[in-house]
Image (cartoon, helix red, strand yellow):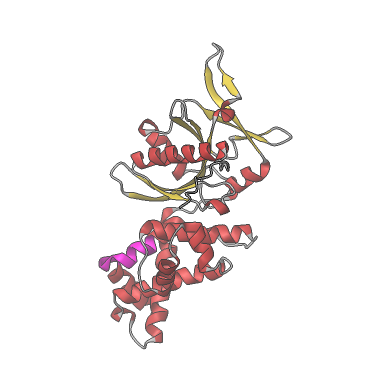
Amino acid sequence: MRHLAPVFNVTMQQPESRQLGAVGEAAAKLAFLRLGWAVIDAAPEHDVGTDLYLEVRDDQLSYSGWMMGAQVKAGASWFDEPRHDESGNIVGWWFRTDQEHVDYWLTHTLPHLVIFHDENADISYWVNITADAAVSTGKGVKIFIPRANTLDGEHRKELFAAARDSGKNYVRRSRRDAIRQADYALAGAIDLLATSTERSPLDVDRRDFRMAFAAELRALRGLTGSPSIATLSKNTNLEIVKIERFLSGEHLPSRWMVGALVHAMAEYARKRGIDIASHEVDVVKWERKWRITKNPGMQKILKNKAHSKAR
């Protein structure tokens, strides 16, 4: 019997830039995980300025109610434009980009970081993208990334502050306003659900709250242009069947999944020029709704609010 020798004359090669990008993103993810933050990968086919979504947590791993986006750059070429102090020491690097990307970051619902990763030294550096940080060059924009801003536990407070106060041009809603808006929206949904079944809001149960939460998600989906389940799946890396169960009320998503879905819907609307109020995609607001749906004690308080509203 004749044996055929394997043929190795065809070479498939991974582009170096893509490999470096994967290394940089993995390093940044590990750094944030060491901080105790949760990290969600952005779908690569829809990456226009965000590689990672970050759920911000404090020292005790408690969720802060804030999320961030991050764009990661890796490779020696990104460090080609250093800035020096009077003694000739490198104090950071200039990052050059176009106005389109800066506008994307500044008008995004989330504050954003740009991260430079030095794969040789295995160190990542970051900067918070703000209007003040972006310097127009006439041909584009340059942003300074300080060498002192290493992505590690020593800069936890600075990263936390960047998430809390993005310094953008739009007015960020206060936590109190977001909570009030969330309570009002969910109380209205509970009131509507109770009315449709000829019950008092005081008689609704945990399943009803889950169904009301799902109705709120479906309403947001409609406001943002009704992205398909397949599109949401691609943009969140969540399985289609899971998203269907979340939207039907069969299951309640986890907290990070809620954030991923809300941001995927907001991004879908932004790309299509759909005008949606910032409070509709406020992370604090959705975090509040999710907590109420999980907590019987908070449900009791909200049922009383809905009952008072219905009287």
Residue 86: % across, % down: 56, 12
Residue 214: % across, % down: 42, 71
Q: Quadrant of the C terminus?
A: bottom left
159 to the left or right of 100: left
The reply to whether the magenta stretch includes residue 97 is no
User: On the image, which quarter does residue 138 sit in?
Assistant: top right
Q: Residue furthest bottom?
A: 198
**Could you say which is closer to the camera, residue 163 or residue 266?**
266
Q: Which span is picked out in magenta? A: 288-298
User: On the image, which quarter does residue 178 sit in?
Assistant: bottom left
Residue 93: % across, % down: 56, 26
Q: How many numbered marks, from 0 up?
A: 0
Height in image: 159 above or below 247?
A: above
Q: Residue furthest top?
A: 87
* Residue at the (48%, 37%) spot, across then down: 24
**Could you say which is closer to the camera, residue 281 or residue 250?**
250
182 to the left or right of 230: left
One can see residue 207 in this view: yes
Q: Residue furthest right?
A: 138
**Could you say which is closer to the camera, residue 176 or residue 114?**
114
Q: Main secondary structure of the magenta part?
A: helix
One can see residue 281 in this view: no
Height in image: 42 above or below 191?
A: above
* Residue at the (29%, 77%) spot, across then down: 205
Height in image: 227 above or below 130?
A: below
Residue 217: % across, % down: 46, 68
* Residue at the (51%, 58%) spot, across then down: 235
Height in image: 218 above or below 16?
A: below
168 to the left or right of 297: right
User: On the image, which quarter does residue 207 sit in?
Assistant: bottom left
Q: Residue furthest front?
A: 1
